Amino acid sequence: MDLLNQQLTRLWNYLSNPDLWMEIFKGALQIVVIILLALLIVKVTRKFVDKFFVQRQTGPIRITERRENTLKKLIKNVVAYVVYFLAIVMILGVFNFEIGPLLAGAGVAGLAIGFGAQNLVRDIISGFFIIFEDQFSVGDYVAVSGIEGTVEEIGLRTTKILSWTGELNVVPNGNVTQVTNYSIHNGLAIVDVNIPYESDVYEAEKVIEEVAAELPNRYEFLLEVPQIIGVQSLDVSHYVIRIIADTSPGFQWAAERNIRKELQDKLFKSGIELPASRIIMYSKEEKERLTIDRDEIRGVQGREVSKGEVRSELERSRAHDDE
């Protein structure tokens, strides 16, 4: 019992010691100051970066807006990582951790991890070259690793791509082996219009040219009047007229949809309807008669006949029956 009382007395004396609470208050105050300073430095740095790039726009050396957005986000992220790391190290120093051995151990551990984390090193190196070579930037519409969408953020390790349906895809930079960037050069809209054989090709092209002349005034992403390439192909029930148009980067699909809409409306009003599929059906009796007539024709002529000849003979037979 006396031992327990002695332990409680010592604990009480330790907790009631003013020096202890002064050390705790001093440490807590240092931690709060370190955190506030880290947040302030990050905030000030971000504003400075924004202001720096605004001033660069009026200087003799200019960079594209897409590359500017990429560099701004990258610099902000790197500064934040460095400041927060230093803040954590300073907070550990408040708790009397030996920072020197800790950093030395972290270096040795980092070296050991580096041999095992080859994918991480590959991602960082690939991210550096993506930014350095300007393969794509924030805001570009790209196709990467089977994913297509708008680049939201480029980091040293990963790239975030937002699909047009709303999914956010995080792609390790090491997996970026091939990039298709739709935002570098102007797009090309390709539209195929099906015209029935009953309609004159020159009349159809005339209607298309009238519609095409008005499209650049209606849609800003069309950079010039769409051009008629000519008859692209001949199908069973129609022929195909191909139209192309230069568009702003990434707007080729929107241009194709709007060109089809305008052409369909104008062609319909001009009396040129879209072609319908044609299906010829034979009843069982007609099929049997067709077989008999074919055999008779072969017996009379003593040679193979084409399906067209057999079909013509069947039609003549039908006409005779109707009479």
Image (spheres, rainbow, N blue to C red):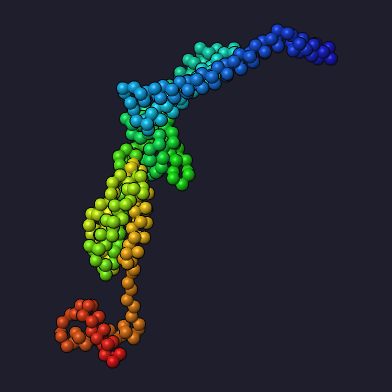
Residue 127, quarter of picture:
top left
Residue found farthest to the top: 19
Tell me if residue 253 can be seen.
no
State the image coordinates of residue 246 (x, y, percent, origin top left).
29, 46
Residue farthest along the right direction in this orientation: 1
The foreground one among 268 and 288 is 268
Image quarter of residue 92: top right
> Which image quarter is the N terminus in?
top right
**Residue at the location (30% across, 39% down)?**
185
Q: Residue at x 43, y 22 (%)?
A: 51
Please tell me whether residue 197 is drawn above or below residue 249 in the rendered image: below
| Quadrant of the drawing holding the C terminus | bottom left
Nearer to me, 73 or 287:
73
Which residue lies at the image location 18% right of the left edge and 87% below the top edge? 299
* Res 9 → quadrant: top right
Residue under the image location 41 percent in, 42 percent down: 149
When the figure is inspected, residue 312 is found, relative to residue 220, above or below; the finding is below
Q: Is residue 228 visible?
A: yes
Q: Would you say 25 lies left or right of 216 here? A: right
Q: Residue furthest left?
A: 302
Query: Residue 110: where, in percent of width, then height?
Result: 45, 22
**Number of dots carrying numbers:** 0
Instruction: Using the image, determine if residue 128 lies above or below residue 274.
Output: above
Q: Nearer the viewer, residue 91 or 133?
A: 133
Percent of width and height locating residue 33: 59, 15
Q: Position of residue 301 (x, y in %)?
A: 15, 85
Position of residue 69 in the picture relative to residue 216 (left or right): right
Residue, far bottom = 323
Q: Is residue 149 left or right of residue 321?
A: right
